[in-house]
Image (cartoon, rainbow, N blue to C red):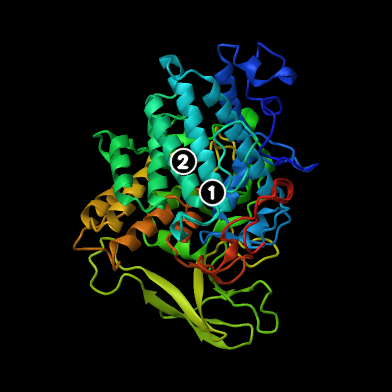
Amino acid sequence: MKTKALYLTVALGAMLGFSSCNLDTFPSDELNSDLLLQDAKGAEYIMDGCYAVLKDEVDFLGYASGNCYVRHYFQLAEFPADNICLSAHTTDPLYEATAYMMTDGLKNVGTLWMVGYKAIYMCNTVIETLDESKPENNQLLGEAYFMRGLMHLHMVTLYAQPYSFGRDNLGVPLRVTTSSEGIKRNTVGEVYDQIVLDLRKGADLMSSKPRGNAGYPCKEAALGILSRVYLYMEEYDKCIATVDEALNGAAPASKLDGDFATYFANAKDRQETLFCIAHETTDDRGQSSIGSMYLKDGIGWGEIYPSDPLMYLYERYPMDVRYTAYILPQFSGAAGKKVYVTIPASDSDPEAPHIKYKTNLIDNAGDYSFKGSDGNTYPIEKRMVNGEGVADPAGPYYEYHANYMGEDCMVRINNDVTLRTGYTIPMIFISKFSYQDGNPMLSSPVLCRWGEVILNRAEAYARTGKDAEALDDVNVIRTRAGIPTFAVGNLLGYDNVIDIVMDERRMELAWEGHRHFDMCRNKLKMDRRYAGAQPYKIVDPTTEPHIIYPIPNNEWTVSGIQQNPGY
């Protein structure tokens, strides 16, 4: 009889045989909560296992290779947005997320749900068993509350509508006990309220010093995630107060890493990192790592590139360390410039992926044009983005456009960038998930860092009309990046401070799993009419049902919880 949910009622003994746990007292195949917690280090084993399960490969319906929570999370959170270009079709299930073709049988959709609720169950075991009246239990209890809140946040942001769409919408099952009774989908509001309680409790119990490197949470990690939650809930004053509490009087700049060019390769040991999934050399996943999709350095696939609009943002200030350190164009060494134009799908096959056209750039004394596939010559318009008379120390900056096939199309002019073999897309690699210990496929992916927390407060300030304070926070980030800063009287071509904050979040947090949530919660359209194998369209989160993922088939068919609309 199918009376219990497949994923929400997992026995603890089945969850703790992780490679990263060192359970010396009991055989792993005999573990249960009573035995574990007879050992003085039992709760510590459980929490260590909780962190390990997020990076370990797990079997799901016969799939194991590359099947791990952290890889799927960063892809599912990032790929539906407008910061990435998928260079070609792929058989990896990441394609469905990128193309808004999600189904409830995908292994990444199912694995993320399964592992997320396993981690929640483990946290509940610690919370129910440790005596809170004993101060020596505070840190581990705090970690359990923190992780329970964080995992519920991941679930509700991926599988339910944004909080800003309504508190009463269907959320995800809220699990605050190890009991398997009463499995249902709570409302979005109920889930967020519990997340706030858990993160607040975690912050109150944990100290500012974690048990080890940044792979273990601390008080400030809980406050950092809590500031994000309040931002998502549009509780802007609470977001500001939470960041203030986390800073505890310190200057924001003092929390940032001064050597940002090497930050991500060393994230687990850097002061800016509040929480990451710490990886060691033994955790190298090679071609199954997050970095393998962004970088081809010996072993990687190198199939995900920065989107054209994002590249234009970075190119406004070519000295930006976020651009110079983490975006790696592959140059051919040939003479002359190339141009490529993003072309809409044809009328005869509107569902087909759009194509790209490349040709030699025609430069007639600064008047650019190109020859189309129809043999006609099309002029390229050089548009000044920051307008006339803007006091920008770096001077004006431009974008290129052309009227092609009856549509205003983005044009990219590149200096000898190598094209991917068999395709017309320039190869531009990304190294945010690479080069830990010199390994191009190894990193410790960051789930929360001070750069984000400062920008959380910047947005909250901007949303409450405190433009000067918002710009102060943004300028801390830009100063570290090495680019010009803003002033209330000089927005460097922007019309308002909100747009400044959103663009700064886009550049600072690119590919870290924020852009999709930022655009959807603010009900902003994602313009994906640029080069790539992803669908050529504008995604409106208020009308596109697939901005959230389906409840996995093996969950809703067993537990009977309601599937998301549109699936």
Q: Which residue is mark 2?
A: 195
Mark 2 neighbour class, 10 Å CA radius: few under 14, some 14 to 19, many 20 or more: many
Query: Would residue 153 be seen by someone viewing this image from the given angle?
Result: yes
Is residue 374 left or right of 231 when viewed as pictured? right
Query: Would residue 333 be seen by someone viewing this image from the given angle?
Result: no
Q: Which residue is mark 1?
A: 156
What's under tag 1, amino acid-wise?
A: Val
Q: Residue at the location (50% across, 51% down)?
A: 188
Name the spot of residue 5 as percent of width and height, x first.
Answer: 70, 41
Is residue 449 left or right of 5 when viewed as pictured? left
Vertical order, 21 against 182 (above or below): above
Q: Nearer the viewer, residue 116 or 394?
A: 116
Vertical order, 524 against 34 (above or below): below
**Marks 2 and 1 close (CB-CB < 8 Å):** yes
Q: Residue at the location (65% across, 12% down)?
A: 24
**Displayed quadrant of residue 102:** bottom right
Mark 1 neighbour class, 10 Å CA radius: few under 14, some 14 to 19, many 20 or more: many
What's under tag 2, amino acid-wise?
A: Ile
**Displayed quadrant of residue 507:** bottom left
Vertical order, 13 against 146 (above or below): above
Question: Mark 2: which secondary structure?
Answer: helix
Name the spot of residue 34 as percent of width and height, x first.
Answer: 64, 17
Dot placed on the residue nearer the N-terminal end, 2 or 1: 1
Q: Quadrant of the C terminus?
A: bottom right
